Image (spheres, rainbow, N blue to C red):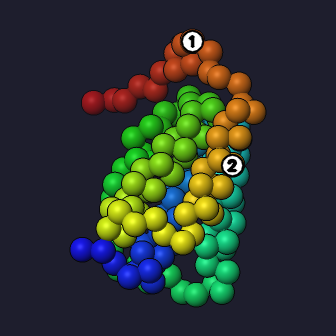
Amino acid sequence: MPQTADTALDFTLTLKQISAQGYRELGDLMAQHLNEPVAATFQQLAQLQQQHLCQLNPANMPIVRTFRDSEIEDDLMAGVHYLMTPHHAVQLALATERNSHRLIRQHSGGAAPDWLPLLQAYEQSLQDLLATLPRPEAGWDDDPDPPHIDQ
């Protein structure tokens, strides 16, 4: 059943909030793994997502989170590797953004929301950022000293 514009916007804002928080947490996680370039990239992504959230919610109305969308949270964690590169981090953000768009369309009954141009502009900004980053070299995930877990 199609939702009202207000509930569709609430849903969108919630997804954006989940993503921003997830990027901050991933930045902290990558810092713990001493992967500073990726930690900085995730912090940058969190900041960009927060700015995007402010564009969608210029009045800074409280966001009422009436659901938990584990799909977005799962998307964020699924592509994480402690040796990933900034390129991987932005690819992950782009995939998450595209999945968010799909969920927003589903939630709004397939109708394009009024704020679709803002969503598209943000996606384009991620594509532009990705284009500035070098592609990872083959074997980027090789670790000559992998972590050992005592059993």
In the rendered image, residue 30, in percent from the top left (x then y), is placed at 58, 42
Q: Is residue 1 above or below residue 106?
A: below
Left or right: where 102 falls relative to 95: left
In the rendered image, residue 135, in percent from the top left (x then y), is placed at 65, 23
Please tell me how many numbered marks the rendered image carries. 2
Residue 46, visible in the rendered structure: no
Quadrant placement of the C terminus: top left
Q: Residue furthest right?
A: 132
Q: Which residue is mark 1?
A: 138
Left or right: where 44 falls relative to 149: right
Q: On residue 125, which mark appears?
A: 2
Q: On residue 60, which mark appears?
A: none
Alpha-carbon distance for marks 1 and 2?
26 Å
Q: Which of the 4 image quadrants contains residue 102? A: bottom left
C-beta proximity under 8 Å, tags 1 and 2: no
Left or right: where 14 falls relative to 122: left
